[in-house]
Image (cartoon, rainbow, N blue to C red):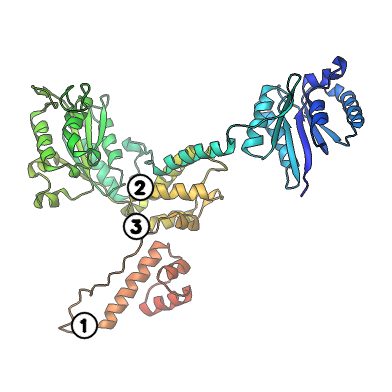
Amino acid sequence: MIKKRILLSWLGKHDLDAEAKGQRGPVASILLDSDAPFEEVRILANDWFGDLPRYEVWLSQLLRKKNRNTKLSFRQASLKSPIDYSGIYSVAREELDRLSGVRSLITLNLTSGTPAMVANWLLLGKGVYNTKLVQTSLQNGLATVELPYDISLEYLQRQDGVLGFIASSEPNLDTHFEHIQTLSEPMREAVALTKKLAPRNLPVIIQGESGTGKEVIAQAIHKASPRAAKPFVAVNCGGIPQTLIDSQLFGHKKGSFTGADSDRKGFFDEAHGGTLFLDEVGELPLDAQAKLLRALQQKEITPVGASKPRSVDIRVIAATHRDLLAMVEEGRFREDLFYRLAVGVVQLPPLRERAGDIPELVDVLMAQLNEEAKDQPGYIGKNVSKDAIEFIKHQAWPGNIRELWNTLVRASIWSESDTLEVEHLHKAMIQRLNKVNKKSPNIEIANGIDVMEILDNTKRYCVEEALRLTAGQKGKAAKLLGLNNHQTLGNWMKQLGLDEA
């Protein structure tokens, strides 16, 4: 298919002066020296409007002498200045939108116009539209400009990295007590206890499932304590290689082991005067637990390779998603260390027990997400509908706030609507594979059973759970249960005496 060849160019002063100097100028040179003639040239002018008729006549005469039947058209573009990037972009984008099509091949002139105009041609011509770029000079004549990179690909790769970072990062929740969502009773009780513990120089254990915000609470305690002006040092105990635990916690001296090229401060030293947050403290091996206990009891540490201990002044806040008492009973966590840390114990509720906090929490997360994703290609700010909020309230969220954040990120990035609905969130959720238990159920049959009652109770549980997960949407609940349609589900509900409302 033969494409219509179109030249799109700004008008430069050199183009207007060409006639008086006996020269062609950039626009004329491109039109006359190109191997194939252009069917149309569109010239954008931001000044010299009174000279345009004379220039049009002169340029038409040159084209006729060359036997080139090129249609000339002009646009007077009112810009604030020759470097008005916003105005230049708007005009250029409008023209490219109008001229682009499957039957057109657009060439952009990089020689005429200001540097701001050329910059816009480069970005739009290779970053958004698939155009040809040319330039001309007295020394080298007409030349095609080939960029050594794909602007659009470079941009998308950069944005893909940003998107990956947003999706994998933790939500940046405010760590002051007054900004923590506490409309639910369990969370209100947890925050009330931490407020009492904050001003005391006591160790604290924060217990809760992964993603419940243990570090947020730890930072809130630190900021409300007399140590607020000193460092808050967070340590992921599960992420330290076992061979480096002593060095990471207590530091080391130069030459104390292979690779110790200089003295290094440990986390205890870095937190001196402040708070040391030991996240996932249950992951520490027993020998490291013994050294941690000694440091807490004696309030001093000995760096690896050092001959003398030195004093440290820190407050320890530990966190875990494990049942430390059960680990004590199993011999996997030292009992004396547990009671040393468990002077203050805060139990954070999972998100499924914080339904009252969800509307405000979603507002906070969406405000952060909209700010971080605003530069993503085509992204528009999102909000969450009331039905979607109700849907969120009825989900289990085993990954808690972290999983909710990740779901909102996926739903927001891939949805073209400015409002997230239930279907957007449902599609964005990672579906966990259900493992069917093929073992015999734990039912004692020897003394007789009512099998119909057991079946009804099982059906009732499954129906109620499916409706909870889908916020009462029968069609989706029926699909979860493997039923053909929602009418079948409705019949089950009537048989089981469940309220359809």
> Can residue 223 be spotted in the picture?
yes
* Three-letter code for the amino acid on which mark 1 is drawn: Ile
Q: Nearer the viewer, residue 216 or 69?
A: 69
Q: Earlier in the sequence, mark 1 or mark 2?
A: 2
Q: Earlier in the sequence, mark 1 or mark 3?
A: 3
- How far apart are labels 1 and 3 at the CA level? 32 Å
Q: Splitting the image into 4 quarters, where does residue 83 fall?
A: top right
The residue located at (48%, 76%) in the rendering is 487
Q: Which residue is mark 2?
A: 401
* Three-letter code for the amino acid on which mark 3 is drawn: Ala
Residue 18, compared with residue 167, is above or below; it is above
Q: Residues within 10 Å of mark 3 (few under 14, many from 20)?
A: some
Badge 3 marks a residue whose secondary structure is: loop
> Can residue 501 be spotted in the picture?
no
Q: Earlier in the sequence, mark 3 or mark 2?
A: 3
Residue 167, compared with residue 330, is above or below; it is above
Q: Which residue is mark 1?
A: 449
Q: Tell me: 288 left or right of 188.
A: left
Please report contact status of discs 1 and 2: CB closer than 8 Å, yes or no. no
The residue located at (19%, 41%) in the rendering is 281
Q: Which residue is mark 3?
A: 396
Badge 1 marks a residue whose secondary structure is: loop
- How far apart are labels 1 and 2 at the CA level? 43 Å
Residue 221 % position (x, y): 25, 35
Residue 408 numbered tag: none
User: Which residue appears farthest toward the top when viewing the image?
Assistant: 21
Badge 2 marks a residue whose secondary structure is: helix
In which quadrant is the C terminus drawn?
A: bottom left
